[in-house]
Image: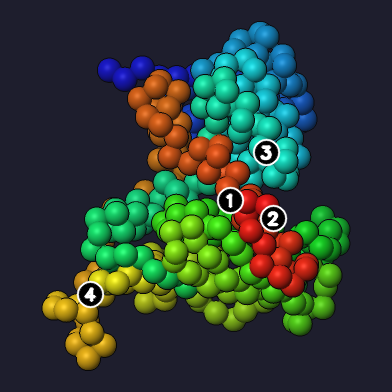
Amino acid sequence: MMSQVRIAVAGAGPSGARHTEEVDASESAVLAAIVDPSPSGTELAAKYGVPQYPSLTELIATDKPDGIILATPSRMHVDGGLQCVAAGVPVLVDKPIGHNVIAATRLVKAGERARVPVLTGHHRNYAPIMTEAREIIRSGVLGTVIGVSGTAMFYKPDEYFDVGGRWRREPGSGPILLDFTHEINNVLSLIGDIATVMAATSNPTRGFPAEDTSAMIFYFANGALGTFLLLDAAASAHSWEHQPARQDAGPSIGSDEDAYHIVGTQASLSMPTMRVSTYEGSPSSSQPLTTSRHGMELSHPLTIQMTHFADVIRGDAHPLCSGRDGLKTLQVVEAIVESARIGRPVDIAN
């Protein structure tokens, strides 16, 4: 039988509680502890009958687990991750990998030097639809991928901006930093590294200091080009959510609305409808395209991510979304923000 690994969860907020639920339900792992000094931490630990520790320092010194999930606030990710690496404990860091690129780079390099697995919790990587899309692209059926167009258009209600004060109206609280990391990580996973970005933002709908409308151009290292439109004040269904339990966040997988269109020299793939359109003969606009639709069994990406993390801890798998993958995502997001600020393209390497 497969041995179960002991995993502790740091952070007792909504994300930590969700991760705790997955660890407890997993056949690959057992819940070792909750790390959070707050009453929420006490309540969560009591619910699952495990010890509560006020800090990672006390957890590691008292009962070092096999792995740790960091579901703490973003500003705590790097310091917490560095503690795990120093203790030789594999760590899954909730996205983003760090609060900025400089700090995140420290964590990623420390993990690589110590050969301690650092994973980034971009859980969409584990969704069956993403796995299927990557397999389609890698099979070569699309030919050479030369372009991608993407949209994330949804509407945040007025009350969203009144919860917890007015911080959600301020610069840095718009959809680029709060929502777009998921999309960037998807695009990097499907197409490859982004070398240069050009971005523009505006706030015509609400007039808040934070943007509500953004447009981007991506120059990929492999020569492909991409465009993306990001709106959080849009009456549109052209946004989608990988999690089967979150059908309210966009059209369900298999609906007739698409958010990504990946184009190759031989065929194209639309997501989430999972339609592949291809020429039967020599490619030509004068020839008809044949369209097929790929199906798959749905399962929650957080569940798959949990099983994968346990496999990595045991040494049976390499991280699907590593710390460096999370760093690349953060680099692109920061470049988008900078490009919009200065009105010029920004090279990721710089």
Badge 1 amino acid: Thr
3D distance between C-alphas at marks 2 and 3: 12 Å
Mark 3: few, some, or many residues within 10 Å (few <14, many ≥20)? Answer: many
> What residue occupies the far top of the structure in this picture?
62
Q: Is residue 223 left or right of residue 111?
A: left
Badge 4 amino acid: Thr
3D distance between C-alphas at marks 4 and 2: 36 Å
For label 2, the residue is: 334
Badge 2 amino acid: Glu
For label 1, the residue is: 329
Of residues 1 and 267, the one nearer the viewer is: 267
Q: Could you tell me which secondary element the residue under label 1 belongs to? A: helix
Badge 3 amino acid: Ala
> Counting residues from the N terminus, which is met first, the one under dot 1 or under dot 3?
3
> Counting residues from the N terminus, which is met first, the one under dot 4 or under dot 2?
4
For label 4, the residue is: 278
Which image quadrant: the N terminus?
Answer: top left
